[in-house]
Structures are given as C-alpha cells and as structure tokens.
Image: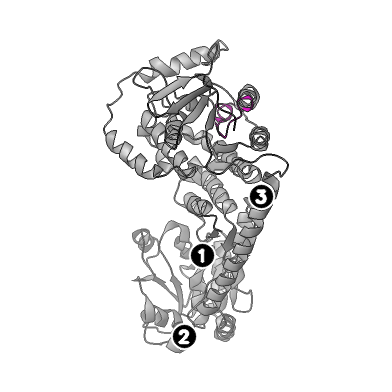
C-alpha cells in the first residue's frame, strides 16, 4: 500500500481469508476485534477490493469497506469431470460414499461430520491433511482418511463420491464445492459464506443451517437415500460450472483492473480539487527551507539524549537530514503531555506565525490513553489545523500515533487503529503526506522503546526519522538509515528500576492533578539554522 501510494498507482486488494473467524477458531478470540480492525483499515485504503462471494461482501460492508467488486474463481472442468468416476477406486460396496476434500484444521470444522456417525448405508471418506488429522481420526473412527491428493488422482476420487459435504462456516468462497459440481457430484454445505453463492437449494445441493448438525445429518440422509435425486443434482451442478473457466475469470479480473485505474484517476482529481485552493499559495515542490515540528513528548525527544545531555528526537534527526539538502531553519514546538487541542491551539498559532515550508504533526497519544476519547472530534480538530497550514502554503507531514508491542498495549490498540484510520481520510482530503506507523511493524519492538516503555529509544527515533525522510523524498534516506544502524547495532543494555523511576512518579503526578510538561517551554520556540559547520539560534528566515 505504501509503495503504491508513493508511485501514485491504484491498489486492488483481494479478500480471500476470513482472518477474524480463524482467530476465533484457533482459540484467540480476544484478537478477533483487532483482526477486524486491521481488515477494515487495509481494504478501505485500497482503490478496490475484490470479494469472492456475497457473504464476503456483506461481511466487509459491515466493517465499513466500500468499492467492492465480485470476483469468483474459475474451475478446470476438463480435469474435474464426471467421466473420471470409477466404481472400483474407493472399493465401494453397496454403500453411498460421502466425501470431504480440504485442509484438516480447526477453521474447516471437519469434526462436525461426526453427526453422520451411525447413518445407515453411508461411508465417509476424507481427503486432505493438516494439524487436526490425528484428532479427527480419533473423533471419526469409522471414516476413511486418504491423506493429501492432487491432480488427476484427486479428480478421480472426487468424481467417485456420491455426495460431497463441506461443513466449514468461514469459507470466503469454496473452490472444492465448484470442483465437486464439475465432477457431477451433489453438494451439502453450511448455509454461510461462500457456499451461499455456489449451492442452489434443491437444484444442485442442500445448504443446512449453520451449526445445526441434525440438519446436516438430515440433508446427507436425503441424498444418500435417493439415487435419482443425486443424479439430477449432479447434472445441474455440472451445467452450472461449465462456463466458469479460468480464462473467463482472468478476463473478469483484467476488467476490474481497468475499473480500478479509472477510480484511482477520479480519486486523485477529487483530492486535488479539495486540497488545492487556487487563490492561496501552495507548497513549492522540493523547497524546504523552514521546518517546524508540532506534537508531544514523542516529538520533543524524551528517552533520546544527545551527547550534551539535551533531548533530541525523530524530528531533530529528520531536520538534520533535510538540512543536508542545503541548510534549514528548524523549530520544535513540541512539549510533553500535550494533547490534540494544545497542538491545534498554541502550537499551531506559533507555527503559522513562523511561516514554515514544512510542518510535521505527531499528536493524539495522550488523548487516546484517557478514558473514552472522542476519536472523530480529535481527527476533525487536526483536519482543521492541517487545512490551515496547507492554505498558508505549507507542506504537512502527518504521523499516526503508535504503541509498543506489549501485552498491556492490547487494550489500547483498537482506538489507536481507529484514530489512524481517521487520519488516513484527513491526509487524503487535505493533501497532507501521511506517515502511517502501522506500516512500520519494527517500530513496536522492545529495542525501539526507551527505559520507561512509553517513549521511543534512540534507536526508535532513528527508525522513525529515516522512514519520514524516505517518505519526504530525501535522497538515499533508506541507505543512510542502514548505514546509521550499522554504527548503533549494539547499544548498551539499560539497567534501571522502571517502577521507581517512571511509573510511580507518573502516578504521583496524576494523583496531584499535575502533568510532566508544567512550566516547560518548547526547546526551539524560534528557528535555529542547521547547515554545514554551524548551528545558530534565533536567525530569521530570509524572505521567500
């Protein structure tokens, strides 16, 4: 997404796996909401999302995803064909063969097939392998497990089934159902997800009520006891898939790509109209002579001490990288404990008075850790601030707040993700440059966080600075970042007592109604000049 955005290319996302349902099936239900939030952010940022079924489309629509197009899957109707049926292949007797094909894993719910135990006249054959095989062999002692099959061998076995059954409720499509139909085999599947689009009730198969194993048993028994119905359903299934070739699916995909290009062009034109105001000055490409950093303690540079004992942070490091292009006047107005209202108030007022070419804004973390933050109000306040700076002719770098990868941070991740999602819209509407820290997974690692576990370490500040510089087009920023990292690969281990030095003082201040930034002033309330061989304070910028 980030690379495509830089290259101004459309992005087509294909939704294939119900990650949220998988999380629940694998016993980590607490992460389901986080998975849904991630899916929502990813697909809302795409130019277009391809969904394989109506169930997937409805699921993403509930998460707020739009611009979806239906794209199913092709099937090899020559490989999977009724002519491959063999009466001797499965060593059939007088019984009806009920078969399943697929991965043997929790999300496939193969254990539900125990509902068929004791059903007279049937034989259960399971094709596939996976982590649940041993457990399933114990649960289904009367089933025949054939392991993983592929190619012509698989096609012959599927064609030799009398009934195909698939119990998984988290299928976004269900390719094996198509292959069964192509083989002339009727299907019994759960009435949820992909099967809803592939199985026509009473025509080429049955859909049973999700979770209702008695209904599953009844549907299989109905087909097992009626050979004429099985043949009719099988013929109808074959006719339904004969036109679903991979060639046709490929042509449909190319048409969706053309549609995505058109949508992307319309998006760019729309953003330009909203963000650019012809009557007001716009930032001049490549001209960055005055840079101002706004924000809280993360931008002030806590836990990133310079050799002289002063604080330096990612914004200070970014300023040095920008200064290498020919000198830079830099001001850092960030102060610890400040919230969005502070940044959009006094900090914004001072910044506008200094007439910057570039402004970076990293704010919101102090609001988001409070009970019941109003995420939309915060984003609206920031959008107004960004719009004012853009109207003044300044370029704006908007950075999303972030969290360390710690167990305690899980409780806050959802609101941080929601705020980042709002900032994505702010950037699109105002023409700001967005540094989405969600796309920097390394930033959450423990080594990138300071001794207080709240602020970035020097390593983390370096990482953020180089990614910001790369996003702003600073020449060779990525290579410089790798070189810098080689000089700091082994930083001294921090020995400290976290509770005594950081947690308890913070709690004590809050009990007294105080905050860390009381009485402090910004470290660079006016421009300092950064250039070759000198740093001077208070030097005013020349007239543009």
Residue placed most toward the observer, 541 or 313:
541
Mark 2 and mark 1 lie on one chain; the one further toward the N terminus is: 2
Residue placed most toward the observer, 222 or 129:
129
**How crowded is the residue under tag 2: few (<14 C-alpha within 10 Å), some, or many (20+)?**
some
Question: Does residue 251 sit above or below 449 in this rendering?
Answer: below
Residue 361 drawn in magenta:
yes
Question: Does residue 397 sit above or below 182 in this rendering?
Answer: above
Q: Residue at x 27, y 26 (%)?
A: 492
**Rendered image coloring scheme:** one colour
- The residue tagged 2 is 78
From the top left corner, tell me how far across and down residue 6 is, in percent: 51, 51
Residue 78 drawn in magenta:
no
Q: For residue 53, what is the image quadrant?
A: bottom right
From the top left corner, tell me how far across and down residue 198 is, in percent: 58, 72
Q: Residue at x 46, y 69 (%)?
A: 118
For residue 78, side relative to residue 277 (left or right):
left
Residue placed most toward the observer, 272 or 4:
272
Residue placed most toward the observer, 504 or 209:
504
- The residue tagged 1 is 167
- The residue tagged 3 is 272
Q: Residue at x 67, y 32 (%)?
A: 381
From the top left corner, tell me how far across and down residue 168 is, in percent: 51, 62
Helix, strand or loop at mark 2: loop
Q: CA distance from mark 1 to mark 3?
A: 49 Å
Mark 3 and mark 2 lie on one chain; the one further toward the N terminus is: 2
Q: For residue 242, what is the image quadrant?
A: bottom right
Residue extent of the magenta highlight: 352-371
**How crowded is the residue under tag 3: few (<14 C-alpha within 10 Å), some, or many (20+)?**
some
């Amino acid at each position: 997404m980030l690379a495509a955005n830089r290259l101004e290319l459309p992005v087509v996302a294909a939704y294939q796996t119900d990650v949220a349902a998988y999380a629940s099936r694998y016993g980590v239900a607490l992460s389901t909401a986080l998975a849904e939030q991630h899916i929502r952010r990813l697909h809302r940022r795409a130019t277009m999302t391809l969904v394989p079924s109506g169930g997937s489309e409805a699921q993403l629509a509930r998460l707020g995803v739009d611009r979806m197009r239906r794209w199913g899957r092709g099937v090899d109707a020559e490989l999977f064909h009724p002519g491959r049926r063999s009466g001797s292949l499965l060593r059939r007797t007088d019984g009806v063969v009920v078969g399943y094909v697929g991965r043997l894993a929790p999300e496939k719910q193969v254990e539900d097939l125990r509902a068929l135990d004791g059903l007279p006249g049937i034989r259960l054959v399971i094709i596939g392998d996976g982590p649940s095989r041993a457990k399933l062999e114990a649960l289904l002692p009367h089933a025949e497990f054939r392991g993983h099959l592929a190619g012509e061998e698989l096609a012959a076995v599927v064609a030799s089934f009398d009934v195909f059954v698939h119990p998984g409720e988290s299928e976004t499509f269900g390719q094996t159902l198509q292959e069964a139909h192509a083989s002339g085999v009727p299907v019994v599947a759960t009435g949820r997800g992909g099967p809803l689009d592939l199985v026509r009730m009473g025509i080429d198969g049955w859909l049973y009520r999700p979770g209702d194993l008695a209904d599953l048993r009844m549907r299989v028994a109905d087909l097992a006891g009626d050979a004429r119905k099985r043949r009719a359903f099988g013929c109808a299934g074959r006719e339904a898939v004969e036109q679903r070739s991979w060639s046709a699916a490929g042509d449909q995909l190319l048409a969706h790509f053309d549609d995505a290009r058109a949508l992307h062009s319309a998006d760019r034109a729309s953003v330009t109209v909203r963000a650019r105001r012809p009557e007001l000055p716009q930032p001049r490409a490549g001209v960055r002579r005055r840079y101002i950093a706004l924000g809280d303690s993360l931008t002030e540079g806590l836990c990133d001490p310079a050799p002289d004992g002063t604080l330096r942070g990612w914004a200070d490091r970014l300023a040095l990288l920008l200064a290498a292009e020919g000198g830079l006047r830099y001001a850092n107005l960030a102060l610890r404990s400040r919230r969005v209202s502070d940044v959009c108030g006094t900090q914004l007022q001072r910044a506008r008075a200094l007439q910057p070419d570039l402004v970076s804004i990293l704010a919101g973390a102090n609001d988001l850790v409070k009970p019941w933050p109003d995420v939309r109000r915060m984003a609206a306040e920031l959008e107004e601030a960004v719009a004012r700076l853009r109207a003044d002719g300044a370029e704006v770098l908007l950075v999303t707040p972030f969290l360390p990868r710690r167990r305690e941070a899980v409780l806050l991740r959802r609101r941080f993700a929601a705020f980042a999602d709002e900032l994505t819209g702010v950037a699109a509407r105002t023409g700001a440059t967005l540094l989405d820290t969600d796309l920097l997974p390394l930033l959450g690692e423990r080594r990138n966080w300071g001794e207080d576990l709240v602020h970035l370490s020097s390593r983390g500040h370096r990482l953020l600075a180089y990614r910001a510089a790369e996003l702003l087009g600073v020449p060779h920023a990525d290579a410089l970042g790798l070189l810098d990292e080689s000089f700091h690969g082994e930083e001294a281990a921090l020995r400290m007592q976290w509770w005594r030095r950081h947690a308890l003082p913070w709690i004590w201040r809050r009990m007294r109604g105080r905050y860390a930034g009381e009485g402090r002033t910004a470290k660079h309330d006016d421009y300092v000049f950064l250039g070759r061989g000198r740093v001077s304070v208070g030097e005013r910028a020349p007239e543009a």
